Image: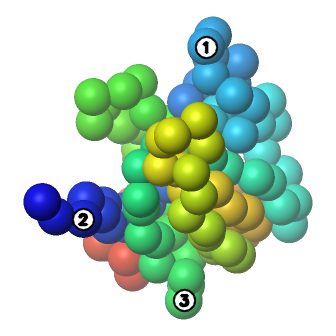
Amino acid sequence: MGIQVEFNPDLALRKFGTAGRRPEECLPEKLEIGKIYDFLKEGQRNYWLDGEIPLLKTEGNQVLSRPLASIVILEATHIKDNNKIITKGKYKVIEVFDINDKKINFEGLKRI
């Protein structure tokens, strides 16, 4: 038996208003620079806290969008909720990207 921990180089949330998901599991309706949002992910996840990471939209099963924004994770806490381990936290939006722009904004964890 081991401890299952996932290391995430990004924060991937569901489309705003996804049925069957809590609001914190989804992207906000509109991303605003400088605003702080709550997030919630199933599992024990570790995020990089010492710099900017990409915010992505997930369709599930590791189907991810290009970066929607650059964020910083302000806090991440592991808790048990209804006998499930979850990671909850807060992130701050640093920059919002134009999804039609093909510009590369990240190389790994390095913000370009």
* Whole-percent x, y for residue 75 in the image: 67, 73
Tell me, for residue 20, which label it has, or none: 1
Foreground of the two, 59 or 44: 44
Q: Quadrant of residue 112?
A: bottom left
Residue position for label 2: 3
Tell me the kind of residue under disc 3.
Answer: Asp
User: What secondary structure is found at the residue carrying circle 3?
Assistant: loop
Q: Earlier in the sequence, mark 2 or mark 3?
A: 2
In the displayed image of the protein, which residue is found farthest to the left?
1
Task: Mark 2: give few (<14), some (14-19) or many (20+) Cα within 10 Å.
Answer: few
User: What secondary structure is found at the residue carrying circle 1?
Assistant: loop
In the displayed image of the protein, which residue is found farthest to the bottom?
50
The Cα atoms of the two marked residues, 2 and 1, are separated by 27 Å
Q: Nearer the viewer, mark 2 or mark 1?
A: 2
Task: Mark 3: give few (<14), some (14-19) or many (20+) Cα within 10 Å.
Answer: few
Question: From where the camera sits, is residue 59 visible?
Answer: yes
Task: Please tell me whether residue 24 is drawn above or below residue 112 in the rendered image.
Answer: above
User: What secondary structure is found at the residue carrying circle 2?
Assistant: loop
The Cα atoms of the two marked residues, 2 and 3, are separated by 24 Å
Task: Please tell me whether residue 23 is drawn above or below residue 77 in the rendered image.
Answer: above
Q: Quadrant of residue 98?
A: top right
Residue position for label 3: 50
**Residue contact between numbered discs 1 and 3, judged by CB atoms under 8 Å:** no
Tell me the kind of residue under disc 2.
Answer: Ile
Task: Please tell me whether residue 82 is drawn above or below residue 56 in the rendered image.
Answer: above
Task: Mark 1: give few (<14), some (14-19) or many (20+) Cα within 10 Å.
Answer: few
- In percent of the image, x 46 and y 71: which residue is there? 47
Q: Earlier in the sequence, mark 2 or mark 1?
A: 2
Q: Is residue 23 left or right of residue 35?
A: left
- In percent of the image, x 48 and y 49: which residue is there? 85
- In percent of the image, x 36 and y 27: which residue is there? 60
